[in-house]
């Protein structure tokens, strides 16, 4: 089994070779999109944030932007700023430079307006894309792969087939020396004590319990019941009755490996193995956090069906519901419903998904990529001032 990717200056390998246009704030997001539209082979990451943020909320957004630029799937980065926003371009540029990859900035106010900034940005991007196009894939060890695990639109089959089979895939990757990451703290509520037993230390176990409590406290501080959004209406219609029931199904995605550490949103792991990242249950914001943490690929389970993709990483869709697979065959890559209605074992289906993951690493496009699903959003933990 061979995996090929693009070796980066920091020693990591990308399985895609994107040149991204990264706005520092909402004020420069539209300009970033217009620059990207002029140069083939680029992707913009527009967002609503970057100005009038303070404290941990500001730090998290900065960490996420830098982490996205450092992601191994990114070959080069053009940072686009207005010039007066809270997150200054130099902070993001310097953070990405630590990875050794090409990164430049365009500041709208310094250029003299959007038209001049677009012209300058397109010129820089053209050079970046030409240089990135010269990169050749090299063989790398599967132990250098970092997998992000996500679920969305869960139903009763998710905890029976879709999530358990991905847990097997996670274990297979870790046994091969790789790294896997569980997300969605909201969907650990009621099952956190079970996961905590697998922590490699008391410190890690306590940190896991802390992030779950932190999530619950956010809801309490707003004076609302989290059960108003979890489970979602779709989850309930699909047969999930409580947040605890949803969480017990969700944690099957974690397989059986020891938990090496708990990561803040967008934080990079300190070693290989299995990690839990503190992200919301909202799928797109959760995926963004794992990509900022360095994941090159996402496996996404869904019982109800969802088309969600990513601008910089392939997203492999798996469903445990054969009806959903047949209904949304344009969006879903693997039918794990065969475990329930086709007599296929968890191990056999896990091997199919693992083999698919290797093919996608080697260049096969997922259905989300083919349909240009580039959903993107950043999780925030504070108010805008």
Image: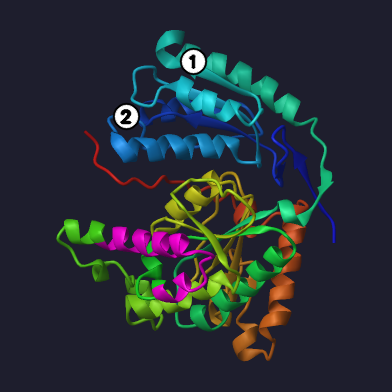
Q: Residue at x 32, y 69 (%)?
A: 230
Of 173 and 351, the residue lying toward us: 173
What residue sits right under mark 1 in the picture? 117
Q: Range of the magenta residues? A: 193-216
Crowding at dot 2, Cα within 10 Å, few <14 / some 14-19 / many 20+, comes out as: some
Q: Which image quarter holds the N terminus?
A: bottom right
Percent x, y for residue 11? 73, 38
Q: Residue furthest left?
A: 223
Up-down relation of residue 84 to residue 30 (above or below): above
Up-down relation of residue 228 to residue 273 (above or below): below
The residue tagged with tag 1: helix, strand or loop? helix
Q: Which image quarter holds the C terminus?
A: top left
Label of residue 51 in the image: 2
Q: Is residue 28 visible?
A: yes
Query: Does label 1 or label 2 sit earlier along the sequence?
Result: 2
As measured in the structure, the alpha-carbon distance from the residue carrying label 1 to the one carrying label 2 is: 20 Å
Percent x, y for residue 370? 65, 53
Percent x, y for residue 318? 59, 70
């Amino acid at each position: 089994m061979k995996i090929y990717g693009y070796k980066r200056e920091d020693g990591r390998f990308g399985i895609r070779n994107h040149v991204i246009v990264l706005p520092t704030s909402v004020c420069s997001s539209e300009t970033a999109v217009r620059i990207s539209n002029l140069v083939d082979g680029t992707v913009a990451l527009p967002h609503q944030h970057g100005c009038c943020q303070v404290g941990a909320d500001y730090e998290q957004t900065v960490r996420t932007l830098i982490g996205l630029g450092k992601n191994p799937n990114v070959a080069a980065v053009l940072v686009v700023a207005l010039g007066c926003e809270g997150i200054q371009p130099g902070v993001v540029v310097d953070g990405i430079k630590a990875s050794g990859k090409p990164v430049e900035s365009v500041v709208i106010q310094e250029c003299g307006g959007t038209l001049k900034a677009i012209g300058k940005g397109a010129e820089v991007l053209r050079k970046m894309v030409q240089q990135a196009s010269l990169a050749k894939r090299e063989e790398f060890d599967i132990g250098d792969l970092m997998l992000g695990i996500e679920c969305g639109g869960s139903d009763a089959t998710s905890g029976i087939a879709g999530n358990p089979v991905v847990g097997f895939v996670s274990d297979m990757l870790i046994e091969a020396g790789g790294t896997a990451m569980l997300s969605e703290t909201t969907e650990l509520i009621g099952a956190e004590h079970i996961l905590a037993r697998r922590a490699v230390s008391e410190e890690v176990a306590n940190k896991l319990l802390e992030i779950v409590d932190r999530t619950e406290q956010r809801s309490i501080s707003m004076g609302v019941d989290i059960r108003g959004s979890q489970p979602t209406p779709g989850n309930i219609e699909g047969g999930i009755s409580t947040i605890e029931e949803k969480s017990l199904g969700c944690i099957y995605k974690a397989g059986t490996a020891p938990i090496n550490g708990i990561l803040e949103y967008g934080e990079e792991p300190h070693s290989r193995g299995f990690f839990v990242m503190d992200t919301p249950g909202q799928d797109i914001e959760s995926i963004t956090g794992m990509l900022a943490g360095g994941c090159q690929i996402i496996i996404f389970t869904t019982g109800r069906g969802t088309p969600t993709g990513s601008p910089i990483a392939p997203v492999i869709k798996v469903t445990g519901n054969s009806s959903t697979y047949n209904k949304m065959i344009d969006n879903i890559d693997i039918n794990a419903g065969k475990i329930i209605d086709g007599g296929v074992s968890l191990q056999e289906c896990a091997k199919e998904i693992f083999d698919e993951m290797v093919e996608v690493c080697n260049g096969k496009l997922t259905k989300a990529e083919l349909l240009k699903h580039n959903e993107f959003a950043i999780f925030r933990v504070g108010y805008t001032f």
